[in-house]
Every structure is written in C-alpha cells, then in structure tokens.
Amino acid sequence: MTKYVYFFGEGQVEGAGDMKNLLGGKGANLAEMLSIGLPVPAGFTLTTEVCTAFYDNNRHYPEELSGQVKEALGKVEAQMGKKFGDPKNPLLVSVRSGARASMPGMMDTVLNLGLNDETVQGIIDQSGDPRFAYDSYRRFIQMYSNVVLEMDGDVLEHILEKKKEEKGVELDTELNAADLKMLVEQFKKKVQEVVGQAFPEDPEEQLWGAIGAVFGSWMNPRAITYRKLNDIPAEWGTAVNVQSMVYGNMGDDCATGVAFTRDPSTGENYFYGEYLVNAQGEDVVAGIRTPQPINKAKYKEGDLPAMEDVLPECYQQLLEVRSILEKHYRDMQDIEFTIEKGKLYMLQTRNGKRTAKAATHIAAEMVKEGLISKKEAVLRIEPEQLDQLLHPSLDPAADKDVIAKGLPASPGAASGMVVFNADEAEEQARLKKRVILVRVETSPEDIHGMHAAQGILTARGGMTSHAAVVARGMGKCCVAGCGDVKIDYEKQQFTTKGGVVVKRGDMITLDGSAGEVIYGDVPKVQPELSGDFAEVMTWADEFRRLKVRTNADTPHDSKVAREFGAEGIGLCRTEHMFFEGDRIQAVREMILAEDLTGREKALAKILPMQKSDFLGIFREMKGLPVTIRLLDPPLHEFLPQTDDDVAELASACGVKFSDVKAHVEHLHEFNPMLGHRGCRLAISYPEVYDMQVRAIMEAACELVKNEGFDIVPEIMIPLVAHVNELKILRENAVAVAEEVIKEFGVEVEYLIGTMIELPRAALMADKVAEQADFFSFGTNDLTQTTYGLSRDDSGHFLPDYVERGVFRRDPFVYLDRAGVGQLVKMGKEKGRATRPDLKVGICGEHGGEPSSVIFCHEIGLDYVSCSPYRVPIARLAAAHAALQEEDA
C-alpha cells in the first residue's frame, strides 16, 4: 500500500530533509528540524503524490488516504494530549501548503481549524482567556470562508472594520471578548447569506474542506503565474501539512514572527526579522499592524520596541536556533516562529529568497566562514539572478503608475521623454535630454536612435526581435511586443488599453526586467559590481570548460564585454557599422550604382570606415579571437522607405526621384528572411565581401606590423545552405587576404568559416566543413527556419502556445533541445567527422540563456557568444554545467 501520509513529532519523525520531492519543502524541513532537536509542534504531511492523484482523478483522493490521515491525526492527539473535535480538550490544527520549490504566498493556508461553538468553550476552559478563544474563532471563520468557501475576504473584513469604528479603536487587539464573540455571530450569519450554506461545525468536514482547498490552490491563477515565471513544472504538485496549533495571540507573553538568518537584500551577516506581540502569523505579513524589529541591529529612533528587549529570553533562544539552522543547512534561512506563553516553537525554515547582491555576498562570506566550498558557493547563485547586478533597477520603495505591460525584453530600468523616431532620439540625446524611443517595431535603420535612447518600447516583436536583441547587446532597457499600446506616428502619441494618452515629450519609465511601462520618472537604484561578485565569478571560471565570447559591433561594446570577462568576440555584425553617420549615404550610393565600377567607387568610400572599426575592436580585444560576420541583411534594409526620404536620397545622389523609387521597389522582397541576403548577395555582388575582407585584413596586418599585436581574425560567411556557396566565397576571401598580407609584408594567420543558420547546412555539415575552419550556429535564425516562425511576427501568438501547453517555453528565448538543439548537435558531430579540429560555437541570443548554455556544454561546443551584459550569466551557467556534470 502506498504511503501517502508522514507523521512528524518529538521522538518520532517519519520523513527526512532529503524527501522534498515527496514531502514538499515545508514538510521535509519540519521533519529535519525535529531530527536536529528543535521545538516543532507535531503534525503530518500529505505527500505531493496525493496532489498528483487528486488532479489525475477528477479531484478525488486515493482510497487509502482517509485511513492514513485518521491514523496520523491520532498520533498528533497522543503527543499533544488533546483530541480533535473534543468539546472539553480540543486540538486545533493549521493546514498549509508546501511545494518542493518555495512559492511564498502563492497558495492557501487555514489556521485554528477545529473550532466551532462547542470547542471554543473548551479553548476558553483550557486557556482561561475568552478573548483569545473568540479572537482565534473569528480568524478561523475569516480564513476558512475565504480559502475554502471562496468568499471575498473583504466582506468579513468590512464587518470587522465597522466593529472597530463602533468601539472607537484602531487595532484588532483593542476589541474585547464580547466584541469578538459578537463578530463570530455576525460572520457566520454573513457566510450563510453570501455562500448560501451554514458555516461548517463538524471539525472533520472542516479538515477535508481545507485539505481540498490547499490542493486546489496549486492551480489558482497566482500560483500558475508564479510557476511560469520560475519555471516550476505543474506536475510536481504540492504537499499539505496539517500541524497542531500553537498560539501567538494568547497575551503579552506570546508573539509570532518571520526572520532571515542574514539580510536578504544585502547579504549582511546579521539577524533580520520582524515580530508582533499577541498576534498570529498572518498579522505580520498582512500589514494590519506595524511589525516590530526582532533586534536592535539596525534600530532607528522611533522604531517600535525590539523583541530583544520585550522578550529577551525568547530572543536568546531564537539566536541559538539561528546558529543551529545556518550550521545545519549551510545557507541563509527564512524562518517562521511562534512564542506561546514564553515558549518558542519553529513553524518553518527554508532557504531564503535573496537578491543577486545578497546571493553573491552570502556565498563569498560563507566560503570565508568555512561553511561551504567554492564549488557550493558558485552553485548557490542562479545565473539569471545576475541580471539584477548588471543593470539599474527601479527603487523598490518608489511609487509607480503602470500604464501598460509588454515583454521584459532587455533588463534594467530607464526614464526619458517619449520620441517616435530615431533621428529625434539622436538629436535630443545630443542636447543632453534623456529619451525613450517608441516604435511599432525597430529596424536596423533605427540603430542610431536606439543607441542614443535610454530605453526602447515597441508595440510589436518578441523576446528575440530586432529591438530585443540589439537592446540587450547595448545593455539598453527594452520593453517589446507591448500590445497594450497603440502608436500613432502622425499624431506623435500612443494610447494604452486603459485610455491613457502619452504624447511626444511626455516622461515615461520602462522596467525591462518586468516588462512594465510606467507614467512619469521613477527613481532608480544603480548596480554595484562589488568585490564579492568579482570573487565569485573568478571561482566560476575555475570550474567551467566552455569559453564565453560576446556579440559586439563597436569598440565600446568590446570594452564592456572584456570588463565582464568575455574571452573574445563570437559575432561582430558588420551591417550595424553601415548605418553610422555618413556611411549610410555611401552604402546607398553603392546600392544605386548602375554597374561594377559605380559599386566599387562607393565601396572605396566605405573601406576606410570599416577598417577603422576593426582597428578599434581588435585593439580592445587585445589578441583575443574576433569572429566578424560579413554583410547579412538584404539591401532594401539600407534604403529609405518614405517618399520624403527617397527624394532626399535622389537629390544627394543626383538621380531622378522615379529612378530611386523604382530601385527601392525592385529590391522589395515578399519574404526577406529567405531572400537575397547573406552569402547569396555576395554570389551576385562579390565586391561587397571583397571590400570587407580587405578592411579586416588591413586592420589586422597594420596592428601586427606597427603595434606588435598577435591577431587571428575569424571571417564568417553567413547563410550558407550549400557547400558550393562557401567554396566560391572562401576562394575570393583567401585571394583578397593573401594579397593584403603580401602588401604589408607580415605573417598573419586567419580563419574562414560559416554561420550555420539553415537546417540544410546542419544536415550537410560534413560537406560544409570541407570549406570551413569553424562553425558558429546562429540559433536565432536556425530556430526561425526550423520552426518556420518569424521571431518578429510570432510574438503576438507564441504566448498562447506557451499558455496552452503547445510549447513548454518560447523557443526564441530557450533553445529547443529536441529540435533545433539536435540540429546543432548533429552539425557539430558531422562537421568534426570531416575536420576534427573544427572550432564550434553558438552566437544566437541563446548564448546568454542559462539552460541553453548548459546544453552547449553537454554537447561539447567550444564556446557560446552573447551580448556583453549577459557574459557573466553565461560564465556562471557554464560553471554550473561543469559542476553538475561532476555530480551526475
């Protein structure tokens, strides 16, 4: 027979701390605390398997469960010396959730269960305190009505507030026994009126009602949302803990509180917490009364008296418990406690949630204290948490008026005046104004405005849209795919779903970590890359095997990435350089040229500009590898789209408006993603790639000859589908490179490889490798071409796919291991079968997403490449991958 119920009590503990998957975090930790001698009220845990069975069987329990609950309840009665439902000597219990992953506040709790009109008298006889008994009873009716009977909690709260008004008091504690007894009667009457049934008097009915409600709360909206945000599988289920009550509301020698063994915001090593005298647990977190500090470590004048002074003996007991728990769990703990008549009871401990700053500080300090090893310290910090350290964030104490929500596309927070085009963003930035660039969607032509803006807001596009990818690379805050806003370029305003109109020049704030658009200028907190952060990252580097490069297109990005620990550049996108200043004009001249001579004349203007870029990047990377992708987008992206801009270009080039307009229309493509771009463009116009290769090699040779650099440029040819494309373009590149080397009279090694971003290239990787020195998997486009999905257009329906379980996660954010991942794995294996020394990495946005980085480690890639501000995240994830492999 399956065991569904596990008892815990002094001298008899059926569970253990390593049974979290079965008992949930709370149940396992209650058992563990008892096993190390801490005072924990007796109780029992219904396992997560009950939850799974509950949902698998149309909310029906396994047959054996009822008998096992009855048996466990008997053990609790024996240990506590009370009987559940007995009018003279009643046992009251709490019923709480306890998932294996901590989900604070997401699921439901019921306290004081077992009270009715008879047992309340037994509590009065036991305690000699009618006020306490009726206070517990009214609390029970409030919680049970809300959690189990699904009644709006405000209904009974309103009756309570009205009673306090009648009595002329502010606090619940100022109501006397008669007041509370009357409230109980009013509450029950209101429940009958609203719910249509009497409040249940039978304790057994109450118990099963509460158990069902707690299991039911696993699927409440806030729990579902929390699981999605934290990637907690729904099939894990929750456990339910039934525990004998201890009372913090029996008088002034009673209290309840919540504490952290260290500061969860900063990681500082002091006991941090709050408590209330004569209260129950929910009072501390509900904000009904102002909690008091547990000690005077951070005491400020005007603070309420600390537990250290009010209940000094209990505080000393709690200090001892703090020390025991930290030494036992070797991590910062989040604890809940109750003091009944001067006796301390522990109700919960769990590894405390903490900020990234606190996580790094605690990890570093615990290594110094000898509590944990460097390996454990590295594994304690979640890679995604580091985003908090790398970008400014909103001041958590500040008020904010959220007017719209989109996708949290690039983290951080930014405020600025709204502008609707890139030129104005640049112009206002020149005037030292802070701006937010608002676009329906961005294109490469907006790059200068994006660079000038504090943040970017788009109405369309997903997590790997142009706006999102470029913003992350720049370290700019971005909210993308914000369907809540309707943008009107003509009126220079946007309107939210809620009817708020925001005009050009109005101030807004973006929270790129939460996807929020906020009206006005909200105060920010600047990141501090402390010594702890640097130290922990050094430890991570000791363990990882996978190299981490960056995606960088400018010397500035390269410098930022180096400061974050990048070991080279895995993707330098040369097209971004084409949009800078006066370069775009030369590019357009090249596109509009009638013949090869005209194109070469225009390209000759671009050559020194490109060379200058590469000189800056090579200098910043100081001999580290740099992979430069030759021109990738279709030519039409460089041409103006509006008639006014077309007229301006025609005038500048001295050609007819109609000729330019015709050229723009000629280059238009129905599906540019699959059109005349990348290597296909170079097959038609080889002079474009010849110019770029010359610029790369001239920069490298100049630095080798004049500045003593040791440089191995990696020239990457994009969008190869057939080995013959690469063969032709490789021969061209080698010819140009050798010519430049001869001109400079130096020896420079260089590599020529390709970006694998089409399924055919992965399938034919053994053939492609015959012409490639390296592969770089462009997983953004490989995901698009494998799924047949546009990353820019799918943002409005992909959330539905995730919501309905078609996809577990967005494949543009998390690398699809089963599909796209298998193409990467196969491409690597086939490529190395041909060329064993083939260097292989990825350079899509997945290169900075932790689970994708771990996959790249597992399949044996050499490196990942990601935006500069995600380099530390990738470094830490790569360390996690190596350490988890050791433990497997």
Image (cartoon, rainbow, N blue to C red):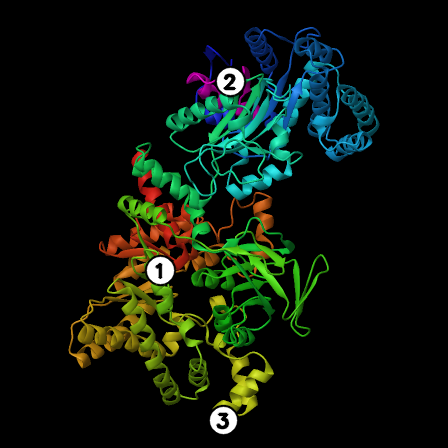
Q: Quick check: can you spot residue 720? A: no
Q: Which mark is residue 654?
A: 3
Q: Which mark is residue 40?
A: 2
Q: What residue range appears in magenta? A: 29-53
Secondary element at tag 3: loop
Question: What's the amino acid at mark 2?
Answer: Val
Q: Which residue is more in the foreground, 664 or 286?
A: 286
Q: CA distance from mark 3 to mark 1?
A: 43 Å
Q: Which residue corresponds to the image point at 50% horizontal and 64% vertical from the top-left?
A: 466
- Please name the residue that numbered disc 1 is placed on: 561
Mark 2 surroundings within 10 Å by alpha-carbon count, few (fewer than 14), some (14 through 19), many (20 or more)? many
Taking 10 as reference, is 795 above or below it? below
Taking 109 as reference, is 497 above or below it? below
Q: Residue 811, position in %: x, y?
A: 49, 51
Q: CA distance from mark 2 to mark 1?
A: 50 Å
Secondary element at tag 2: loop
517 sits to left or right of 200: left
45 sits to left or right of 366: right
Question: What's the amino acid at mark 3?
Answer: Gly
Secondary element at tag 1: helix
Q: Quick check: can you spot residue 269? A: yes
Taking 303 as reference, is 76 above or below it? above
Taking 483 as reference, is 158 above or below it? above
- Image quarter where the C terminus lies is top left
Q: Residue 145, position in %: x, y?
A: 73, 27
Q: Earlier in the sequence, mark 3 or mark 1?
A: 1
Mark 1 surroundings within 10 Å by alpha-carbon count, few (fewer than 14), some (14 through 19), many (20 or more)? many
Q: CA distance from mark 3 to mark 2?
A: 87 Å
